[in-house]
Amino acid sequence: MSALTKVLIIYVCVLGFITFIMYGIDKSKAKHHKWRIPERVLLGMCIAGGVIGGWLGMYAFRHKTKHLKFYLVQSLAVLIWAILFIISFRI
């Protein structure tokens, strides 16, 4: 395993954890009718590398599961990150 792959794994894990926490915070705020985290921020975190946390957050908190754009963006993010990992394994 290359150094790049190790860095990518750490990066994705950290961002995934942060994204998962953000989904939980947003769900809590939604329940209490408070200021929310914008959808573009949640989706941006998924694209930036937090896609695993985004998927887990959607289902653990039952949050944003009825929004097609979340499924589409997160599916695209999975594809992008899969390609990046494949490339990193070949280096």
Image (cartoon, grey):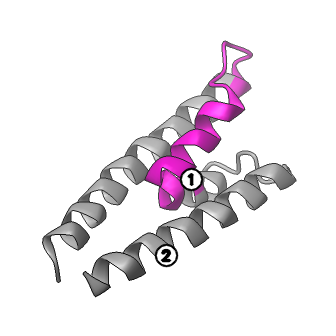
In the image, residue 18 above or below residue 37: below
Q: Considering only order in the chain, which callout, 1 or 2, is on the residue closer to the N terminus?
A: 1
Tell me the residue at 78%/53% (across/down): 65
Q: Which residue is situated farthest in the front direction here? A: 91
Tell me the residue at 57%/51% (across/down): 57
Tell me the residue at 21%/61% (across/down): 7
The label on residue 83 is 2
The label on residue 54 is 1
Residue 30 horizontal/vertical position (percent): 71, 26
Tell me the residue at 66%/21% (across/down): 36
Residue 14 horizontal/vertical position (percent): 31, 50
Residue 90 horizontal/vertical position (percent): 30, 86
- What amino acid is at disc 1? Gly
Query: Considering depth in this image, is 5 or 61 the residue closer to the camera?
Result: 5
Tell me where the magenta segment starts and ends, as one range: 30-54
Assess whether residue 53 is covered by the magenta stretch: yes
Residue 4 horizontal/vertical position (percent): 21, 68
Left or right of 89 in this view: 46: right
Q: Of tags 2 and 1, which is closer to the observer?
A: 2
Assess whether residue 91 is covered by the magenta stretch: no
* Quarter of the figure with the N terminus: bottom left
Q: How many marks?
A: 2
What kind of secondary structure does the magenta stretch mostly adopt?
A: helix
Choose top left, top right, bottom left or bottom right for residue 5: bottom left
